[in-house]
Protein backbone atom coordinates (compact mmCIF):
# COMPACT_ATOMS: atom_id res chain seq x y z
CA UNK A 1 0.00 0.00 0.00
CA UNK A 2 1.34 3.43 -0.96
CA UNK A 3 -0.68 6.45 0.06
CA UNK A 4 -3.78 4.33 0.60
CA UNK A 5 -3.62 2.53 -2.77
CA UNK A 6 -1.99 -0.75 -3.78
CA UNK A 7 1.22 0.00 -5.65
CA UNK A 8 -0.02 -1.47 -8.93
CA UNK A 9 -3.14 0.73 -8.89
CA UNK A 10 -1.02 3.87 -9.25
CA UNK A 11 0.11 2.64 -12.67
CA UNK A 12 -3.30 1.36 -13.76
CA UNK A 13 -4.90 4.70 -12.85
CA UNK A 14 -2.26 6.62 -14.82
CA UNK A 15 -2.97 4.62 -17.98
CA UNK A 16 -6.74 4.36 -17.60
CA UNK A 17 -8.83 6.26 -20.13
CA UNK A 18 -6.05 7.12 -22.59
CA UNK A 19 -7.79 6.61 -25.96
CA UNK A 20 -4.76 5.12 -27.73
CA UNK A 21 -4.42 2.33 -25.15
CA UNK A 22 -6.59 -0.61 -26.21
CA UNK A 23 -6.31 -2.56 -22.94
CA UNK A 24 -4.30 -2.40 -19.74
CA UNK A 25 -3.15 -6.00 -19.41
CA UNK A 26 -1.57 -7.03 -16.12
CA UNK A 27 0.82 -9.98 -16.12
CA UNK A 28 1.26 -11.48 -12.65
CA UNK A 29 1.56 -14.90 -11.04
CA UNK A 30 -0.09 -13.69 -7.82
CA UNK A 31 -3.84 -14.23 -7.44
CA UNK A 32 -4.23 -11.40 -4.91
CA UNK A 33 -2.49 -8.92 -7.22
CA UNK A 34 -4.66 -10.18 -10.08
CA UNK A 35 -7.82 -9.45 -8.07
CA UNK A 36 -6.61 -5.96 -7.17
CA UNK A 37 -5.78 -5.23 -10.81
CA UNK A 38 -9.17 -6.48 -12.05
CA UNK A 39 -10.98 -4.36 -9.48
CA UNK A 40 -8.98 -1.35 -10.71
CA UNK A 41 -10.21 -1.97 -14.26
CA UNK A 42 -7.30 -3.88 -15.81
CA UNK A 43 -7.50 -6.97 -17.99
CA UNK A 44 -6.06 -10.02 -16.17
CA UNK A 45 -6.97 -13.03 -18.32
CA UNK A 46 -4.56 -15.51 -16.72
CA UNK A 47 -1.86 -15.91 -14.13
CA UNK A 48 1.67 -15.70 -15.52
CA UNK A 49 3.27 -19.13 -16.11
CA UNK A 50 5.63 -20.26 -13.36
CA UNK A 51 8.68 -20.22 -15.65
CA UNK A 52 8.11 -16.49 -16.29
CA UNK A 53 7.73 -15.65 -12.59
CA UNK A 54 11.15 -16.65 -11.24
CA UNK A 55 13.89 -14.34 -9.97
CA UNK A 56 15.76 -14.92 -13.22
CA UNK A 57 12.78 -14.32 -15.54
CA UNK A 58 12.91 -11.09 -17.53
CA UNK A 59 10.36 -8.38 -18.24
CA UNK A 60 11.12 -9.02 -21.90
CA UNK A 61 9.93 -12.63 -21.79
CA UNK A 62 6.85 -11.72 -19.77
CA UNK A 63 6.03 -8.94 -22.23
CA UNK A 64 6.35 -11.16 -25.29
CA UNK A 65 4.21 -13.82 -23.61
CA UNK A 66 1.49 -11.23 -22.93
CA UNK A 67 1.82 -9.76 -26.43
CA UNK A 68 1.53 -13.15 -28.15
CA UNK A 69 -1.62 -13.96 -26.18
CA UNK A 70 -3.16 -10.53 -26.75
CA UNK A 71 -2.61 -10.45 -30.51
CA UNK A 72 -3.95 -14.00 -30.85
CA UNK A 73 -7.16 -12.89 -29.10
CA UNK A 74 -7.64 -9.34 -30.35
CA UNK A 75 -5.50 -8.96 -33.47
CA UNK A 76 -2.39 -6.91 -34.15
CA UNK A 77 -1.47 -3.74 -32.27
CA UNK A 78 0.79 -0.82 -33.18
CA UNK A 79 2.82 -0.92 -30.00
CA UNK A 80 3.42 -2.59 -26.67
CA UNK A 81 3.68 -0.16 -23.78
CA UNK A 82 5.42 -1.60 -20.72
CA UNK A 83 4.53 0.25 -17.52
CA UNK A 84 6.19 -1.31 -14.50
CA UNK A 85 4.33 -0.81 -11.19
CA UNK A 86 7.55 0.13 -9.41
CA UNK A 87 7.24 3.63 -10.94
CA UNK A 88 4.13 4.92 -9.15
CA UNK A 89 4.61 8.63 -9.87
CA UNK A 90 4.78 8.33 -13.66
CA UNK A 91 2.28 10.92 -14.93
CA UNK A 92 -0.52 10.36 -17.43
CA UNK A 93 0.87 13.29 -19.43
CA UNK A 94 4.16 11.44 -19.84
CA UNK A 95 2.39 8.36 -21.19
CA UNK A 96 0.52 10.48 -23.72
CA UNK A 97 3.74 12.25 -24.71
CA UNK A 98 5.45 8.88 -25.22
CA UNK A 99 2.69 7.77 -27.59
CA UNK A 100 3.01 11.06 -29.50
CA UNK A 101 6.78 10.57 -29.81
CA UNK A 102 6.26 6.98 -30.96
CA UNK A 103 3.98 8.11 -33.78
CA UNK A 104 6.02 11.16 -34.73
CA UNK A 105 9.21 9.11 -35.07
CA UNK A 106 7.97 6.37 -37.35
CA UNK A 107 7.20 4.04 -34.42
CA UNK A 108 10.80 3.96 -33.21
CA UNK A 109 11.03 2.66 -29.63
CA UNK A 110 10.48 5.22 -26.85
CA UNK A 111 12.26 4.82 -23.51
CA UNK A 112 11.77 6.82 -20.31
CA UNK A 113 14.90 8.53 -18.99
CA UNK A 114 15.71 10.95 -16.18
CA UNK A 115 18.61 13.38 -15.75
CA UNK A 116 21.56 11.48 -14.28
CA UNK A 117 22.28 12.27 -10.63
CA UNK A 118 25.88 11.10 -10.96
CA UNK A 119 27.50 12.21 -14.19
CA UNK A 120 29.33 9.39 -16.05
CA UNK A 121 32.37 11.65 -16.52
CA UNK A 122 32.78 11.62 -12.74
CA UNK A 123 32.26 7.88 -12.21
CA UNK A 124 35.07 5.46 -11.40
CA UNK A 125 35.87 1.76 -11.37
CA UNK A 126 38.29 0.03 -9.03
CA UNK A 127 41.24 -1.68 -10.72
CA UNK A 128 43.87 -3.36 -8.56
CA UNK A 129 42.75 -1.39 -5.50
CA UNK A 130 43.04 1.95 -7.32
CA UNK A 131 40.42 4.29 -8.69
CA UNK A 132 40.32 4.59 -12.45
CA UNK A 133 37.96 6.83 -14.47
CA UNK A 134 35.08 4.77 -15.81
CA UNK A 135 35.34 6.74 -19.04
CA UNK A 136 38.97 7.28 -20.03
CA UNK A 137 39.78 10.82 -21.07
CA UNK A 138 36.54 12.19 -19.63
CA UNK A 139 36.19 15.63 -18.09
CA UNK A 140 37.33 15.10 -14.50
CA UNK A 141 38.53 18.69 -14.42
CA UNK A 142 35.29 20.12 -15.78
CA UNK A 143 33.01 22.21 -13.59
CA UNK A 144 29.64 20.61 -12.91
CA UNK A 145 27.82 23.36 -14.81
CA UNK A 146 29.97 22.66 -17.88
CA UNK A 147 29.25 18.94 -18.05
CA UNK A 148 27.16 17.82 -21.03
CA UNK A 149 23.67 16.57 -20.23
CA UNK A 150 23.51 12.89 -19.25
CA UNK A 151 20.48 10.67 -18.71
CA UNK A 152 19.72 7.31 -17.09
CA UNK A 153 17.01 4.76 -17.73
CA UNK A 154 14.34 5.20 -15.08
CA UNK A 155 12.27 2.07 -15.76
CA UNK A 156 9.05 4.07 -15.93
CA UNK A 157 8.12 3.50 -19.55
CA UNK A 158 9.04 1.44 -22.61
CA UNK A 159 7.08 1.63 -25.88
CA UNK A 160 7.98 -0.48 -28.90
CA UNK A 161 6.40 -1.96 -32.04
CA UNK A 162 5.63 -5.69 -31.63
CA UNK A 163 7.60 -6.79 -34.68
CA UNK A 164 10.68 -4.91 -33.48
CA UNK A 165 10.40 -6.34 -29.97
CA UNK A 166 10.23 -9.86 -31.35
CA UNK A 167 13.04 -9.27 -33.83
CA UNK A 168 15.44 -7.51 -31.46
CA UNK A 169 14.34 -9.34 -28.30
CA UNK A 170 15.06 -6.09 -26.50
CA UNK A 171 13.41 -2.77 -25.71
CA UNK A 172 16.71 -1.07 -26.57
CA UNK A 173 17.63 -0.40 -30.19
CA UNK A 174 19.93 1.92 -32.10
CA UNK A 175 17.06 4.26 -32.96
CA UNK A 176 15.27 4.51 -29.60
CA UNK A 177 13.77 7.90 -28.76
CA UNK A 178 14.16 9.41 -25.27
CA UNK A 179 11.17 10.48 -23.24
CA UNK A 180 12.90 12.88 -20.84
CA UNK A 181 11.09 12.89 -17.49
CA UNK A 182 12.63 15.78 -15.59
CA UNK A 183 10.35 15.70 -12.54
CA UNK A 184 12.29 13.87 -9.83
CA UNK A 185 9.25 11.92 -8.60
CA UNK A 186 8.67 10.35 -12.00
CA UNK A 187 12.15 8.85 -11.89
CA UNK A 188 11.60 7.00 -8.61
CA UNK A 189 11.89 3.26 -9.32
CA UNK A 190 11.08 1.22 -6.20
CA UNK A 191 13.59 -1.62 -6.04
CA UNK A 192 14.93 -1.24 -2.49
CA UNK A 193 13.71 -0.26 0.96
CA UNK A 194 15.42 3.11 0.51
CA UNK A 195 13.46 3.67 -2.73
CA UNK A 196 10.27 2.92 -0.81
CA UNK A 197 11.18 5.50 1.81
CA UNK A 198 11.79 8.04 -0.94
CA UNK A 199 8.36 7.31 -2.37
CA UNK A 200 6.73 7.79 1.03
CA UNK A 201 8.65 11.02 1.52
CA UNK A 202 7.49 12.21 -1.89
CA UNK A 203 3.89 11.54 -0.87
CA UNK A 204 4.41 13.62 2.24
CA UNK A 205 5.88 16.43 0.17
CA UNK A 206 2.95 16.36 -2.24
CA UNK A 207 0.43 16.41 0.58
CA UNK A 208 2.23 19.40 2.12
CA UNK A 209 2.21 21.40 -1.12
CA UNK A 210 -1.38 20.65 -2.18
Image (cartoon, rainbow, N blue to C red):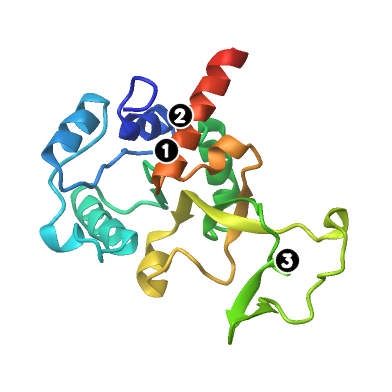
Residue 151 shows which numbered tag? none
Query: Which SS class for mark 3?
Result: helix
**Residue that mark 2 sits on:** 200
**Res. 89 in view:** no
Instruction: Name the residue nearer the viewer: 145 or 24.
Output: 145
Query: Which SS class for mark 2?
Result: helix
Q: Which residue is drawn at 24% across and 61% down?
A: 55
Q: Does residue 203 appear to the left or right of 81 in the view shown?
A: right
Give the Cα separation between the discs numbered 2 and 3: 30 Å
**Residue that mark 3 sits on:** 122
Q: Tag 3 or tag 2, which sits nearer the N-term?
A: 3
**Res. 12 in view:** yes
Residue 196 shows which numbered tag? 1
Residue 184, image x and y in percent? 61, 38
In the displayed structure, 124 sits above or below 119; it is below
Quadrant of the drawing holding the C terminus: top right
Instruction: Name the residue nearer the viewer: 113 or 107.
Output: 113
Query: Which SS class for mark 1?
Result: helix
Amino acid sequence: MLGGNPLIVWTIDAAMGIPEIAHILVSTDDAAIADVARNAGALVPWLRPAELATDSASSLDASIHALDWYEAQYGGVDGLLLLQPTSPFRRRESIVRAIELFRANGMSPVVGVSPAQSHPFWCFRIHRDRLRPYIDGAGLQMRSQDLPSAYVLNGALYLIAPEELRRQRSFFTDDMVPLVMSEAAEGIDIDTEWDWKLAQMMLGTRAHTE
